[in-house]
Amino acid sequence: MSFFTMAKISVQNLLKKPATNMYPKKKREYFKNTRGAIVIEIDKCIFCGLCVRKCPTLALNVSKPEKIWEIQRIKCIICRNCVDVCPKKCLDTNSNYSQSVTQNDKNNLTEVFKGA
C-alpha cells in the first residue's frame, strides 16, 4: 500500500462519524427481543411452582407456604420457559445484560423475593 493510499484512507476516516458510541454519555439501545435477566412482579405471583417445573437448569425455587420465590442467576440460561408457562404473567425478561460474575461472587447470586 502506498503512502498516498494510506493518507487518503486516514483523511476519509477523520471525516466520518465515530464507529463506536461514547459510552458514558450515550447509553446503548438494546434490540427489542434482547434476552437480559428474568424479573418478577412478586405482587402478582401465586407461587404455583409451574416455573420451577419448566426450568431446565433448576435455577428456580418456590415455596408456597412461605411465599418465597428464588432464582440462582448463575444457573439461569434465560430460556424463557418460566416466562411462557406463568399463568399470572408475573415473569418477564428485561433488556439489560446481566453483570459478569467472578469466582468469589458465585455463592452470592441467589436472589430471594418474598410475597405479601
Image: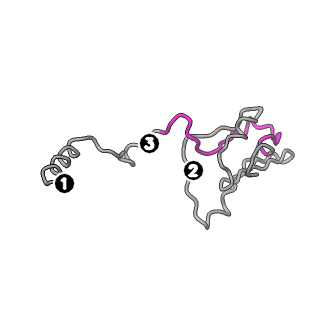
Secondary structure, magenta segment, majority class: loop
Characterize the local packing of mark 3: few (<14), some (14-19) or many (20 or more) Cα atoms within 10 angstroms. few
Does label 1 or label 2 sit earlier along the sequence?
A: 1
Which quadrant of the rendered structure holds the N terminus? bottom left
Q: In this figure, which residue is indicated by the disc labeled 2?
A: 98
Q: Which three-letter amino acid code belongs to the residue tagged 1?
A: Met
Q: CA distance from mark 1 to mark 3?
A: 36 Å
Q: In this figure, which residue is indicated by the disc labeled 1?
A: 1
Residue positioned 62% across, 63% down in the render: 105
Q: Residue furthest right?
A: 65
Q: Which three-letter amino acid code belongs to the residue tagged 3?
A: Arg
Q: In the image shown, does 93 or 33 lie closer to the viewer? A: 33
Is residue 113 placed above or below 84 in the rendered structure? below
Q: Which residues are magenta?
A: 30-52
Q: In the image shown, does 90 or 11 lie closer to the viewer? A: 11
Q: Is residue 44 left or right of residue 30?
A: right
Q: CA distance from mark 3 to mark 2?
A: 14 Å
Is-magenta flag for residue 47? yes
Is-magenta flag for residue 100? no
Characterize the local packing of mark 2: few (<14), some (14-19) or many (20 or more) Cα atoms within 10 angstroms. few
Characterize the local packing of mark 1: few (<14), some (14-19) or many (20 or more) Cα atoms within 10 angstroms. few
SS class of the residue under badge 3?
loop
Where does residue 103 sit, x and y in percent of width and height? 61, 66
Residue positioned 58% across, 64% down in the render: 102
| Residue 72 in which image quadrant | bottom right
Circle on res. 28: 3
Where does residue 95 sit, x and y in percent of width and height? 55, 40
Is residue 102 placed above or below 79 in the rendered structure? below
| Residue 78 in which image quadrant | top right
